[in-house]
Image (tube, rainbow, N blue to C red):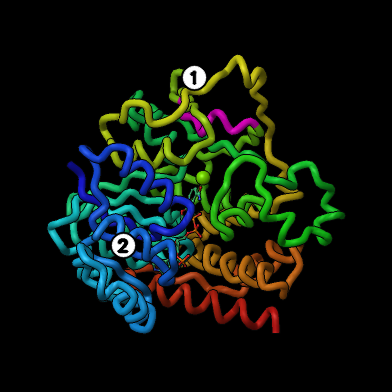
Amino acid sequence: MRNIFLAGSTGSIGKNALEVALAYPDRLAVKGIAAGHFTAELKEQIIRLNPLYCILPSRAESNKAKTALKNFKGVETKFTFGEEGLHEAVLDDAFDIVLNAISGSSGLMLSYRSLAAGKDLALANKESMVMAGDILNAAAKSSKAEIIPVDSEHSALFQCLRCGAKSDVNKLILTASGGPFYKTDKADFKRITVDMALNHPKWKMGKKITIDSSTLANKGLEIIEACFLFNMDEKQVDVLIHPQAAVHSMVEFKDGSVIAQMGEADMKGPIGYALSYPRRFNGLMKPLNLAEIGNLEFFAPDNEKFPFLNLARYALRAGKSMPAVFCEANEFFVKSFLDGKISFNKIAGNVEKVMQGHRPFKLSGIEDVIEAKRQAWSLSETLIK
Ligand code: NDP
Ligand code: MG
């Protein structure tokens, strides 16, 4: 039995993870949850799961939950809040693994605290790896915790890498569906509305990652995530546009052999793998029907139209605090776009300006990452005033 602390339980990954856990009750149990707000959905989860902990970001939100569930028979949940609450939960021996499915940079401290506490981390929150890769890896190493990627491409790479020795790897090939605007003329980017950008052709996801997929910032973040997760150089990570989203990523070995991981575009695959690893769950997903798909296409990405791939590579080469600044500035301008403050075609340019204005500094500990985040946010604010 694997006891899970599921953070971001009401989000797209969180709900899929809950479905996986409920489908394998003899193997998985969700014993703790965290979310951003107290909602009807969270209330229902608490009643259904009777978790040991329910953690919300603020005292006010936590009190709402506590009051609403006071008289429910069978609910013995402890309601806590903030970073302290998360810290208390990840220290509890009741949990074997933490699934971090919080969206954006708010997921940083949970990744760090979980690994520092020696808890295995099923990692959907790519932003934490991008911002603090070296620090998370060091925390995992010293506590002997393992990071198991949930991001579908990285789960694919993690699986493909099991086919050979690390020293025999030539490169990693990340696939990208291309998002909704792959064929749109760059001249038309300024007319892209929030609704258009939220309409992803292949994956149903939370808002932030859906916008990131439409600008290809998501693939930029994933290049950085792959370098930190698998200890690779920026030059060893390629990107291919693959509209069918059947090949989730590939590893090229030194003998020229390329190993690909394939499957339906269904996040239950990578979530289930992270929670069953190193075994697999029987009947987790519908197997891929290749005859039905017919053709698999692959194209080189258009770096001119989608500058985020090169910005991510630049962040990796600059190193130090630059990946964190890239990540946070992008989060800021995605929010600005969603709030109607900037147009779609300004997102990448603004992120680039923040990166140009940042003097990278060494990240010696998690506080330095928080400082990089703060600097990126305040520099970003000056650009939309
Ligand atoms: P969603 O926006 O759908 O869900 C985010 C979840 O996090 C919600 O439950 C939200 O609660 C919760 N949350 C937000 N802030 C906090 C906080 N401070 N403390 C605790 N919980 C919080 O996002 P997704 O599920 O799409 O994505 C989650 C992460 O997984 C992201 O990092 C994303 O990049 C990654 N990912 C997602 C994929 C997908 O298919 N969706 C694929 C690959 C990676 P509330 O709504 O109440 O604020
Ligand atoms: Mg992905």
Q: Which residue is mark 2?
A: 46
In this picture, is 300 found above or below 140?
Answer: above
Query: Quick one: quadrant of the N terminus?
Result: top left
Q: Amino acid at mark 2?
A: Ile
Q: Residue at x 79, y 58 (%)?
A: 192
Residue 281 image point, x, y percent: 31, 30
Disc 1 crowd, CA 10 A, few/some/many (<14, 14-19, 20+): few
Residue type, mark 1 in image: Gly
In the displayed structure image, the side of residue 135 where residue 382 appears, left or right: right
Q: Who comes first in sequence, dot 1 or dot 2?
A: 2
- 66 displayed left or right of 352: left
Q: Quadrant of residue 75?
A: bottom left
Q: Residue at x 54, y 58 (%)?
A: 315
Instruction: Check if residue 110 falls in the magenta segment.
Output: no
Question: Magenta region: which residues?
Answer: 244-252
**Residue 281: assigned label:** none
Whether label 1 lies within 8 Å of ligand 2 gets the answer no
Residue at horizontal 32 percent and vertical 81 percent from the top: 63
- Magenta stretch encompasses residue 246: yes
Q: Residue at x 49, y 19 (%)?
A: 256
Relative to 250, residue 222 above or below: below
From the image, give the main secondary structure of the stretch colored magenta: strand
Q: Nearer the viewer, residue 379 or 119?
A: 119
Q: Quadrant of the C terminus?
A: bottom right
Residue 225 position within the rendered picture, expressed as x and y whole percent measured from the top left? 45, 50
Please tell me which residue lies in front, 102 or 228.
102
Q: Position of residue 22 (x, y in %)?
A: 31, 43
Q: Which residue is mark 1?
A: 256
Left or right of residue 212: residue 127: left
